[in-house]
Image: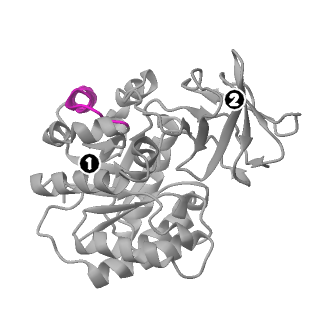
Amino acid sequence: MTKIVITVGPNTSTPESWRQIIDSGADAFRFPASKFGVDVLTDQAWSVAKEADGLGAKLDLLLDLPGSKTRLTNDNGFPLDPQRPVRVAFSPEEADPRLDPPRLGISGGGLDEVAVGDVLVTGDGEEALAVEAVADDHCIARPLTSGELGRRRGVTVSGRSNASESLTAGDREGLETLGAAPFTGVIVSFVESAKTVREVKESLARSFGNRPPPAVIAKVETAAGIGAIQEILDESDGVLLGRGDLLLDVGPIEFYDACRSVLKAADKQGVPAIVGTQLLVSLSNTWLPNRSELAYVSHLIEKRVHGLMLSTETTVGKHPTRTVAMLSSLIERYGAESGRLPLFRAS
């Protein structure tokens, strides 16, 4: 049966919210380390585990290591207005929408080769800015959309390959400290070779000693990762299809084929596959989900995908519990016992 993976965020950060989410059908909690340290997430995972034990529920607790990704520096919402070009510094300068022009910085590098005419795309493609001028340490970009940038969104150059470093120094340091953590799985971002998976497994083996280490889930989200999918599957305990960054890397026309190739390869090899994200994101603001979301999610369930991962729906969405309940009902209606092992947690 397809499992539900929820991402912990502001709207799912209290024991009451965890209990409601678990009661609604969640099978796994994902803790993203892109905005918080591994030590903070470990404490939170222990708290979630305690609530799950009280309910008699067995949860997978998944730590998501972010890898290297270019991110904007705004700690709060940042308004975009096509009438107001934005100064984007190529360094981690503090964001300030009150300046003229408004200012954003970046962390992680990666924009120093932009050119006039390039389009900067943020998040999973929600907002975009067109580069109008370039200097040594910044560019001036005009918003092509009206909206509000979420906190520390990723930013990429449209049409350019966005391959990133799978493991940063921070990721490696975090792996060495997991020996006393409750995580049952570690998600590794931007995996493009089996070598990365082996390195993570070796690090976890050192941390856990004689105890079984967490499963290693390779997040495939670039064209290079797609090209190496077979060797990645050979080494991984599971694979996460990271559709957001994959769309930015391969473009909208190649996107479906890229997704299909990962799922077909995983199914053929019997490796658990999770699909994320923005699966029922319309429920964050509407009463009923979009028809296209309903159709695709039901299709994935019918195809016996191992896991479906919610992100925006449970981090900042207005109705996280109702969204999980809706997904649980769809799984009950269209799912079938696959005869495979549970997602990652040992029974």
Q: Secondary structure at mark 2?
A: loop
Give the extent of the magenta segment. Answer: 190-208
Q: Quadrant of the C terminus?
A: bottom left
The spot of residue 305 in percent (x, y) is 25, 64
Residue farthest to the bottom? 333
Give the residue pinned by disc 1.
Answer: 239
The spot of residue 151 in percent (x, y) is 65, 45
Report which quarter residue 303 is drawn in: bottom left
Report which quarter residue 98 is drawn in: top right
Residue farthest to the front? 117
In this rendering, does residue 214 appear at all?
A: no
Q: Quadrant of the N terminus?
A: bottom left
At a point 42% along the width and 41% down the height, the residue shown is 249
Foreground residue, 249 or 198?
249
* Left or right of 312, for residue 90: right
Three-letter code for the amino acid on which mark 2 is drawn: Gly
Q: Is residue 290 magenta?
A: no
In this rendering, does residue 274 appear at all?
A: yes
At a point 44% along the width and 65% down the height, the residue shown is 279
Give the residue pinned by disc 2.
Answer: 105
Relative to 41, residue 73 above or below: above
At a point 73% along the width and 48% down the height, the residue shown is 77
Q: Secondary structure at mark 1?
A: strand
* Left or right of 186, for residue 205: left
